[in-house]
């Protein structure tokens, strides 16, 4: 494709060189550049692509997109832009033929609920015959084509390449989880969104965004900048305080909430271990819900999903049928079958708010006891560790703190941060022997995650509920030495077979 065409929608300050030549490929990793390609110098948290321009040229780059003038790189064409990431998004969209232009696209953003909503929408869009592709936390997929998801929302270049592949293979619609990082870094700027869904906003990623205002501003980019390009419709959960704020900024938004003042609200609802049943009012008519999802907090996810489907003008009966067809979401209150007459659940909850929502939902199911295994990730926002710990301690009969993905941090240091939240509820830490008696409420700390799961399973009694939280669908653990295979679901099943502790 001609460089001049790639530049069509880019904010260019200056071009040094001729633009009338074909660019053969686009890259932001200098090691992947080949002769005739374009290289985008991206500024990252840990590195700056401008430092790798010479490497890209040595590998054959014919054009370089950069934010600052680079000397002595002739005869390579340089394109000076305001923002290399945004330029990459727009150039990539053009390079891959603007694949989302004729697709029905729903973007889902917020702290919690994104993955569940994308799975529900996938089922509805399948029922509508709209052949959906999905890009999100668990994987990137269309039909049998499943691809690993290193990020919730990939870099714009990777996103457009994958969506282009899905589109060529028959996808007619797209549901995408749009993370705050992705919005802040313009990764989705080339996507034509028909619908944007806002779920909620609670403290998360503050190591990156610094404060809640910065976090909210990143989310607002979807609704202020991207949706209007396609005359898209906002769907907003007004049960959330930030949702109320956002709805006040977007007067024509479809609002979802438990109160009748919302555009989409439940007329009646019942939550049990069998799922969620009820009737939801919408501007298009009532939708009957018969969902296998567990937990009161999933009512909000269902309302947002229905809102997105209504925004796409899908009929209520079809929405209801799609929701009934939706299976459980991997790692989201995923049940593990057992012979202990207990309920065992694996969930991705890894923030204080998400964990609170899950535990409160489990309390409403009235189990004999709640046992919660949880941990906090390393190299991430330390402020959320005591918050998660306090939530686990207050909501559980026995809280078992352990490692999550420690990454390069010392696991014991992470657990010390966790302890500072646990002691807000309990005076002292139990030994494993004290916890094993099953008397009273307390907490125990077991650094090794496998051992923590084994211990929790060994304590299960009839009527108990065990929640293993934090990693959900992930089948790995990230240590200082690298990534190892580790799946909570597998470890629970092994522990059930051996009786718990080995």
Image: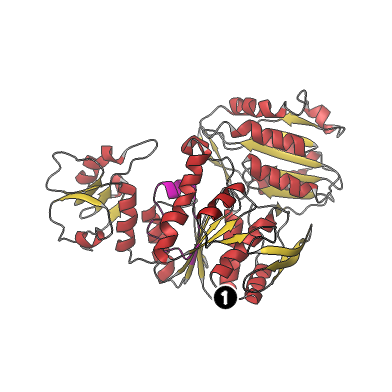
Q: Position of residue 315 (x, y in %)?
A: 61, 76
Q: Position of residue 111 (x, y in %)?
A: 57, 47
Q: Position of residue 217 (x, y in %)?
A: 47, 45
Q: Secondary structure at mark 1?
A: loop
Residue for badge 1: 128
Left or right: 392 with respect to 318?
right
User: Toward the viewer: 231 or 22?
Assistant: 231
For the N terminus, which image quadrant? bottom left
Stretch of the chain drawn in magenta: 174-195
Scheme by which the image is coloured: secondary structure
Res. 104 visible in picture? yes
Which residue is drawn at the image coordinates 52% and 74% (left, top)?
130
Which residue is drawn at the image coordinates 86% and 48% (left, top)?
463
Residue 439 sits in quarter: top right
Left or right: 458 with respect to 379?
right
User: Toward the viewer: 287 or 188?
Assistant: 287
Q: Position of residue 8 (x, y in %)?
A: 25, 61
Left or right: 103 with respect to 32?
right
Which residue is drawn at the image coordinates 20% and 55% (left, top)?
36
Res. 502 visible in picture? no
């Amino acid at each position: 494709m001609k460089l001049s065409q790639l530049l069509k929608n880019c904010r260019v300050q200056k071009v040094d060189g001729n633009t009338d030549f074909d660019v053969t490929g686009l890259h932001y990793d200098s090691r992947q550049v080949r002769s005739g390609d374009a290289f985008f110098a991206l500024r990252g948290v840990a590195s700056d692509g401008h430092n790798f321009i010479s490497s890209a040229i040595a590998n054959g780059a014919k054009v370089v997109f950069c934010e600052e003038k680079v000397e002595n790189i002739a005869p390579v064409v340089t394109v000076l832009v305001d923002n290399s990431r945004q330029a990459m998004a727009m150039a990539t969209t053009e390079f891959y033929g603007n694949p989302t232009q004729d697709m029905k696209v729903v973007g889902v953003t917020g702290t919690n609920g994104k993955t569940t909503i994308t799975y529900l929408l996938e089922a509805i869009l399948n029922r509508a015959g709209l052949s959906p592709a999905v890009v999100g936390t668990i994987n990137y997929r269309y039909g049998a084509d499943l691809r690993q998801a290193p990020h919730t929302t990939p870099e714009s270049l990777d996103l457009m390449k994958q969506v282009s592949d899905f589109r060529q293979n028959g996808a007619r619609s797209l549901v995408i989880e749009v993370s705050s990082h992705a919005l802040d870094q313009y990764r989705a700027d080339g996507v034509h969104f028909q619908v944007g869904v806002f779920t909620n906003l609670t403290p998360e990623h503050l190591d990156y965004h610094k404060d809640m205002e910065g976090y909210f501003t990143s989310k607002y980019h979807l609704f202020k900048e991207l949706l209007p390009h396609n005359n898209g419709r906002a769907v907003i959960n007004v049960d959330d305080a930030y949702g109320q704020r956002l709805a006040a900024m977007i007067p024509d938004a479809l609002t979802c909430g438990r109160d009748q003042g919302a555009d989409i609200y439940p007329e009646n609802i019942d939550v049990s271990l069998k799922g969620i049943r009820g009737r939801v009012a919408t501007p298009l008519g009532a939708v009957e819900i018969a969902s296998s999802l567990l937990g009161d907090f999933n009512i909000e996810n269902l309302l947002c999903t229905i809102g997105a489907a209504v925004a796409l003008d899908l009929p209520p009966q079809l929405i209801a049928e799609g929701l009934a067809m939706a299976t459980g979401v991997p790692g989201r209150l995923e049940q593990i079958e057992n012979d202990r007459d207990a309920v065992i659940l694996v969930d991705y909850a890894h923030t204080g708010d998400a964990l609170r929502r899950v535990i409160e939902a489990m309390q409403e199911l009235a189990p004999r006891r709640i046992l919660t295994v949880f941990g906090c990730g390393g190299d991430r926002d330390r402020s959320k560790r005591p918050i998660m710990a306090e939530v686990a301690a207050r909501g559980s009969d026995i809280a078992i703190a352990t490692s999550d993905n420690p990454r390069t941090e010392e696991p014991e240091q992470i657990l010390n941060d966790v302890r500072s939240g646990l002691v807000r509820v309990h005076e002292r830490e139990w030994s494993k022997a004290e916890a094993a008696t099953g008397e009273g409420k307390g907490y125990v700390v077991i650094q090794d995650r496998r051992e923590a799961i084994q211990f929790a399973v060994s304590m299960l009694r009839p009527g108990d509920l065990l929640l293993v939280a934090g990693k959900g669908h992930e089948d790995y653990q990230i240590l200082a030495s690298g990534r190892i295979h580790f799946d909570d679901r597998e470890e629970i099943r092994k522990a059930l077979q051996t009786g718990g502790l080995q």
